[in-house]
Image (cartoon, rainbow, N blue to C red):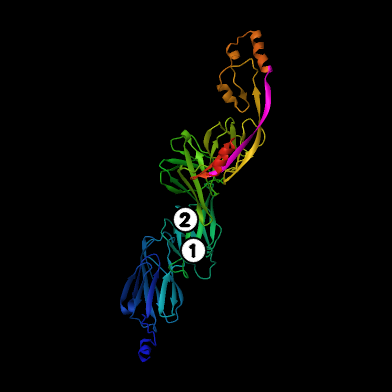
């Protein structure tokens, strides 16, 4: 027991430095203490310990930022025994462009264990818009320039309203907004009346991971990004009735997009092509395949929204990108499919397959099908999920009289174009301009009989690899096999 008691410590003794300087800035700083002729450089995010100060006395500490906004800055503060918070006004001997370049740092002193001095900026403003931005606090004439992605260090002056305003280029100042809305994303609108444009800038405020209690990270982003993830040069344009302004997009390029109108729709085409795609929404998250020239397809993915910019990504077509593949395995039925409320119809011959994409991606994406020449409302194609069913459809059969044996039976399922492609009857080949011959041609047509037939069409919806498939057949066995594979 005596040996065991000796191995258990009675006290935990910690030896701490009297003063620790923490650099919570994205730039290196140099700290000087003239009274003890001490000088040290502290890199971004690092700290240093100072062992030579009597903290019961007041000491003047000089702080220098070697480079910020391209020029050096210097300032100082008095470290006293009761110091807790302080704003350090930094000055420079270089040109500040009329006062648009300023630097204000903040001090926070924590004496929980030792004297920890945190040198920080309350707000880091990061401009990722690609635009030259200006920012100023409410009720203040000091304008800060935010150009490039170099963090802008910002702090409010005391006894001022804690809101700021923003402008891009020569636009009007935006409405006042707060930089303290952590976790909430906002949209700042700067109106440029001269250019007749509104810059929509996404505001995202988070806490610094290095110094969460002291620093806010304010990120300014474009509300729209356009990405070319193909190997071809593209051009895109918003839906604009007043102008025809195409923007070039090189392979692998990502550019911010600033709409001129409120249409929120976009076109795209290949750089050397005159064929323009259908328009599509850029504020709704969706994916679709656009019909391009020479039978090509271009996939567009619209993602983001909320806390992230809307990102419009153009990429090459891959297997499974098409909304559905339609297989017509009917023996003698011509099927028509079309998007709801649109007049454009696709015709499928027996034993024909087709990859289908939307005629108008901005309209309701509902696919209808029916037998060709059937004027009744079509059936909804439920291809977005696995399933099967059957529909009883009717159609008319037109039968030729027996005297014309060489003419095949022509049904109403054939389109007018297919009729023109069919061979002429012997009566048509031997026709002349005489009235007697014309009357002979009309007699067989008067003897034609029409019969109404009904047939059951089975449909199956399933996933084949990455591709949705909608199969039609008149054979129940084929339908059963398809839904059980």
Front-lying residue, 345 or 298: 345
Mark 1, residue position = 206
Whole-angstrom CA distance, mark 1 to mark 2, is 20 Å
Q: Earlier in the sequence, mark 1 or mark 2?
A: 2
Lateral position of residue 34 relative to residue 302, left or right: left
Q: Residues within 10 Å of mark 1 (few under 14, many from 20)?
A: some
Q: Residue furthest left?
A: 37
Q: Quadrant of residue 61?
A: bottom left
Q: Residue at x 56, y 40 (%)?
A: 470
Frontmost residue, 390 versus 264: 390
Q: Is residue 374 left or right of residue 180?
A: right
Count of marks overlaid on the render: 2
Secondary structure beneath label 2: strand
Q: Magenta span covers which residues?
A: 446-462
Q: Using the image as rendered, state which of residue 336 and residue 144 is in the foreground.
A: 336
In percent of width and height, residue 388 lies at 60, 43
Main secondary-structure element of the magenta-colored stretch = strand
Mark 1 or mark 2: which is in front?
A: 1
When the figure is inspected, residue 73 is found, relative to residue 384, above or below; the finding is: below
The outermost residue toward the bottom is 2
Tell whether label 2 touches label 1 (CB within 8 Å).
no
Picture coordinates of residue 409 (x, y %)? 61, 22
Q: Is residue 448 magenta?
A: yes
Can residue 124 be seen here? The reply is yes
**Left or right side of 401 for 242:** left
Residue 277 inside the magenta-drawn segment: no
The disc placed on residue 125 is none
Residue visible at 39% across and 81% down in the picture: 58
Q: Is residue 246 visible?
A: no
Label disc, if present, on residue 133 of the rendered structure: 2
Count neighbours of disc 2 (C-alpha within 10 A) and say few if under 14, some if 14 to 19, many if 20 or more. some
Quadrant of the image for the N terminus? bottom left
């Amino acid at each position: 027991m005596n040996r065991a008691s000796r191995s258990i410590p009675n006290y935990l003794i910690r030896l701490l430095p009297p003063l620790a300087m923490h650099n919570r800035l994205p730039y290196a700083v140099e700290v000087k203490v003239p009274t003890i002729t001490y000088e040290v450089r502290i890199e971004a995010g690092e700290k240093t310990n100072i062992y030579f100060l009597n903290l019961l006395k007041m000491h003047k500490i000089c702080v220098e930022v070697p480079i910020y906004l391209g020029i050096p800055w210097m300032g100082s503060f008095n470290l006293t025994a009761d110091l807790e918070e302080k704003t350090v006004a930094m000055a420079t001997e270089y040109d500040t462009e009329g006062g648009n370049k300023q630097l204000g740092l903040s001090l926070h002193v924590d004496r929980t264990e030792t004297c920890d001095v945190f040198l920080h900026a309350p707000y880091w403003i990061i401009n990722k818009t690609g635009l030259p931005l200006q920012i100023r606090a409410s009720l203040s004439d000091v304008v800060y320039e935010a150009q490039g992605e170099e963090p802008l260090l910002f702090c409010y002056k005391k006894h001022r309203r804690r809101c700021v305003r923003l402008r891009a280029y020569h636009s009007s100042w935006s409405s006042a907004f707060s930089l303290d809305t952590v976790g909430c994303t906002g949209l700042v609108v700067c109106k440029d009346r001269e250019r007749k444009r509104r810059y929509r800038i996404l505001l995202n405020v988070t806490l610094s991971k290095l110094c969460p209690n002291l620093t806010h990270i304010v990120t300014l982003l474009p509300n729209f990004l356009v990405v070319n993830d193909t190997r071809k040069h593209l051009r895109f344009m918003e839906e604009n009735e007043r102008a025809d302004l195409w923007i070039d997009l090189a392979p692998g390029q990502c550019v911010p997009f600033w709409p001129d109108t409120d249409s929120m729709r976009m076109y795209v085409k290949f750089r050397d092509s005159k064929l323009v795609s259908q328009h599509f929404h850029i504020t709704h998250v969706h994916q679709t395949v656009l019909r391009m020239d020479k039978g090509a397809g271009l996939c567009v993915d619209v993602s983001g929204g909320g806390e992230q910019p809307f990102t419009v990504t153009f990429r090459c077509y891959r297997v499974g990108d098409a909304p559905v593949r339609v297989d017509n395995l009917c023996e003698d039925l011509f099927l028509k499919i079309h998007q709801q409320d649109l007049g454009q119809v696709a015709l499928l011959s027996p034993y024909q397959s087709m990859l289908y994409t939307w005629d108008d991606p901005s309209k309701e994406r509902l696919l209808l099908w029916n037998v060709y020449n059937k004027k009744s409302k079509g059936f909804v194609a439920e291809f977005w999920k696995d399933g099967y069913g059957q529909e009883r459809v009717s159609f008319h059969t037109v039968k030729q009289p027996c005297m014309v044996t060489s003419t095949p039976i022509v049904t109403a399922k054939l389109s007018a174009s297919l009729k023109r492609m069919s061979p002429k009857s012997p009566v048509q080949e031997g026709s002349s301009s005489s009235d007697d011959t014309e009357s002979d041609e009309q007699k067989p047509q008067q003897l034609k009989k029409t019969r109404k037939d009904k047939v059951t069409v089975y449909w199956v919806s399933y996933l084949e690899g990455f591709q949705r498939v909608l199969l039609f057949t008149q054979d129940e066995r084929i339908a059963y096999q398809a839904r059980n594979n």
